[in-house]
Image (spheres, helix red, strand yellow):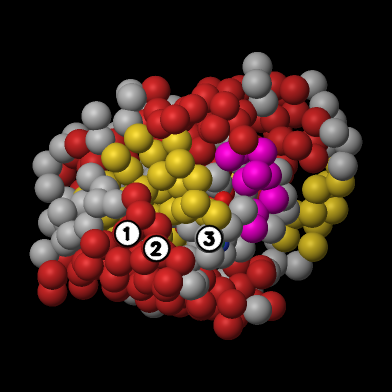
């Protein structure tokens, strides 16, 4: 039985990970400020499931004393999964200072507390494909209802240099640098997972982030969807259970040794916005209402992940195709 700290554990990814850890008998400490819509409900659900195995610390990672206090009171931990973040690109453009405070300074506070109070912990940092920027040099073409890369048909690999765009891209890249350096300078066992489009049950249904859950909620409740661009924007979709599977392999398996991994659904799970809308319509029987708007800055037209490094190090491959994952998201 192990003890884990999950920052942002009341969020979408965190709630899915915590449920599995609790079911194995592990102790889970959640550090979350419940700022995200739906996080309080997710936390109540986890508390009901976890009983004494679950400890909730309501605090802001921007406050170093609060983060230190959590480690001093409840540590040391066998693993720290750092998920707490300002997660919306749109919001990062409106308030870049707060975005940087949470994602860059807050991440530093977490890994610096690991260094001082829990240096043996395995540490996972969740990063984003936005650290690669707009990928303007990668040519793509429309192919029926989606877009495909001409220059990277198997996806973007980890060899691609960082070139973050938007305040969110910059703040997430800064946070991952602190985690990577913690391995180089202090020998802390860190892993960085760069993800693009994660979806699944317990995801907040909001337009600003988590578009798949938002599309599902809007279509099934008769609300109007706004699509920015022509709808052929394409992402490889990663079902949250597949992500949790990799997180557990890293927590339980070979030492991560500061690795950085691109983690996504891969070419087989690449779908455009229009294709996701059509799949939800077919599965739910509800007709979508759509408004088309101009593309937003920083939106990559295509992002497909080459997750080879995760396979080489941890034998991990995503297994859930979007239509199966959407069925679970819709509760069918
Ligand atoms: N969901 C995706 O598609 C996706 C893609 C790439 C990367 N990520 C990253 O994965 C991680 C988890 O994402 P998610 O989808 O579960 O997000 P989420 O918004 O559902 O969860 C984030 C949690 O962090 C908490 N939080 C926010 N600011 C905080 C602060 N200052 N102090 C303490 N807690 C705070 C929120 O209340 C929430 O419970 C984030 O780091 C995100 O950047 C997510």
Residue depicted at 49% across the width and 27% down the height:
51
- Mark 3 or mark 2: name the one nearer the start of the chain: 3
Rendering coords of residue 255 (x, y %): 12, 47
Residue depicted at 51% across the width and 78% down the height:
100
Residue depicted at 70% across the width and 30% down the height:
280
Q: Nearer the viewer, residue 28 or 86?
A: 28
Rendering coords of residue 278 (x, y %): 70, 33
Q: Nearer the viewer, residue 250 or 42?
A: 42
User: Which span is picked out in magenta?
Assistant: 35-43
Which residue is tagged 2?
69
Task: Determine whether the beta carbon of the residue marked 3 sits less than 8 angstroms from the nearest atom of ligand 1.
Answer: yes
Whole-number angstrom distance, CA of label 1 to CA of label 2: 5 Å
User: Is label 3 or label 2 in front?
Assistant: 2
Rendering coords of residue 217 (x, y %): 75, 37
Task: Let me know if residue 239 appears in the view.
Answer: no
Rendering coords of residue 90 (x, y %): 66, 68
Which residue is tagged 1?
72
| Label 1 environment density (alpha carbons within 10 Å; few <14, some 14–19, many ≥20) | some
Whole-number angstrom distance, CA of label 3 to CA of label 2: 10 Å
Pointers 1 and 2 in contact (C-beta within 8 Å): yes
Q: Is residue 327 above or below residue 264?
A: above
Q: Is residue 242 magenta?
A: no
Pointers 3 and 2 in contact (C-beta within 8 Å): yes
Numbered badge on residue 59: 3
Task: Let me know if residue 167 appears in the view.
Answer: yes
- Mark 1 or mark 3: name the one nearer the start of the chain: 3
**Quadrant showing the C terminus:** top right
**Quadrant showing the N terminus:** top left
Q: Quadrant of residue 288?
A: top right
Whole-number angstrom distance, CA of label 1 to CA of label 3: 14 Å
What secondary structure is found at the residue carrying circle 3? loop
What secondary structure is found at the residue carrying circle 2? helix
């Amino acid at each position: 039985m192990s003890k884990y700290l999950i920052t942002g554990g009341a969020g979408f990814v965190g709630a899915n990970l915590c449920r599995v850890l609790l079911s194995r008998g592990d102790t889970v400490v959640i550090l979350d400020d419940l700022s995200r819509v739906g996080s309080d409900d997710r936390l109540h659900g986890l508390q009901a499931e976890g009983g004494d195995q679950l400890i909730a610390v309501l605090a802001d990672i921007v406050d170093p004393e609060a983060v230190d206090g959590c480690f001093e009171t409840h540590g040391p931990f066998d693993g720290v999964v750092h998920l707490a973040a300002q997660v919306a690109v749109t919001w990062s453009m409106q308030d870049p200072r707060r975005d940087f405070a949470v994602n860059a300074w807050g991440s530093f506070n977490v890994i610096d507390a690991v260094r001082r109070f829990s240096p043996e912990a395995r540490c996972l940092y969740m990063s984003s494909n936005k650290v690669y920027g707009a990928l303007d040099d990668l040519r793509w073409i429309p192919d029926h209802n989606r877009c495909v890369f001409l220059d990277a048909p198997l996806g973007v690999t980890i060899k691609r240099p960082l070139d973050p765009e938007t305040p969110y891209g910059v703040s997430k890249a800064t946070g991952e640098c602190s985690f990577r350096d913690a391995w180089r300078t202090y020998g802390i066992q860190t892993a960085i997972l760069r993800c693009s489009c994660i979806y699944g049950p317990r995801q907040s249904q909001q337009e600003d982030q988590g578009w798949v859950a938002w599309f599902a909620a809007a279509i099934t409740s008769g609300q109007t969807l706004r699509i920015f661009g022509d709808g052929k924007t394409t992402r490889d979709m990663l079902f949250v259970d597949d992500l949790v599977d990799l997180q557990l392999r890293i927590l339980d398996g070979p030492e991560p040794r500061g690795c950085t991994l691109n983690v996504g659904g891969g070419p087989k799970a690449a779908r455009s916005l229009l294709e996701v809308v059509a799949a939800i319509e077919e599965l739910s029987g509800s007709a979508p209402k759509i408004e088309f708007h101009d593309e937003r800055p920083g939106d990559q037209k295509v992002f497909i992940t080459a997750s080879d490094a995760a396979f080489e190090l941890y034998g991990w491959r995503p297994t859930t195709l979007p239509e199966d994952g959407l069925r679970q998201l819709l509760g069918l």
